[in-house]
Image (cartoon, rainbow, N blue to C red):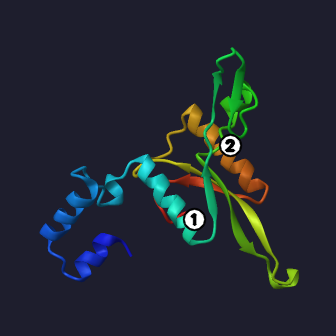
Amino acid sequence: MKFFEWAKRWNVPPQAIDELTISLTKGKPVVQTIEQASEAAVMALVRLEASKKGARLWRNNVGATYTKDGSFIRYGLANESKNINESLKSADLIGIKPVEITPEMVGLIIGQFVSREIKPPGWEFKGTKREQAQLAWAQLVNSLGGDACFATSEGTL
């Protein structure tokens, strides 16, 4: 249950919620609905949901840079070369979730690879080159038994 749902159920006056919010956030604005959320807020919600379900997700920063000594390094999954990165873009969140195997496997639990490409609420696939490369990553992960998708809110695990 979300805080604002709880407050409504208990008839907490809006003034009390405002006072608490200002006190806790030192006056900074607070996202009250998923529609107001940023991509960063969606990422936090997805990670929280994953933890509640026994999964673990980590930020997968992808990029390339020169070091102080002039060396060039690439970082992040599937970023071994510029050509690979242009056609296959690994997702924002990478992790693992527990999956119980069917009875014929005597109740063993395996870890399934999880990948979530985070997008802001209301995002729609437009087919840009970047989105196509992100989709190619999700399709590859899913084709190998993983669990990958775009996520614009919690509820994707």
Residue 10, quarter of the rendered image: bottom left
* Residue drawn at point x = 30 percent, y = 77 percent: 6
Percent x, y for residue 125? 50, 44
Quadrant in which the C terminus is drawn = bottom right
* Residue drawn at point x = 70 percent, y = 29 percent: 74
Percent x, y for residue 25? 27, 55
- Name the residue that disc number 2 marks: 136
Q: Nearer the viewer, residue 7 or 16?
A: 16
Q: Residues within 10 Å of mark 1 (few under 14, many from 20)?
A: many
Instruction: Inspect the image, locate mark 2, and give the three-letter code of the amino acid beneath it.
Output: Ala
Q: In terms of secondary structure, where does tag 1 sit?
A: helix
Instruction: Inspect the image, locate mark 1, and give the three-letter code of the amino acid beneath it.
Output: Ala
Q: In terms of secondary structure, where does tag 2 sit?
A: helix
Q: Is residue 72 left or right of residue 24?
A: right
* Residue drawn at point x = 30 percent, y = 75 percent: 5
Q: Is residue 152 visible?
A: no
Dot 1 or dot 2: first in sequence order is 1
User: Measured along the vertical axis of the image, is residue 129 above or below residue 20?
Assistant: above
Quadrant in which the N terminus is drawn = bottom left
Q: Is residue 78 left or right of residue 5?
A: right
Residue 79, quarter of the rendered image: top right
Percent x, y for residue 126? 50, 40
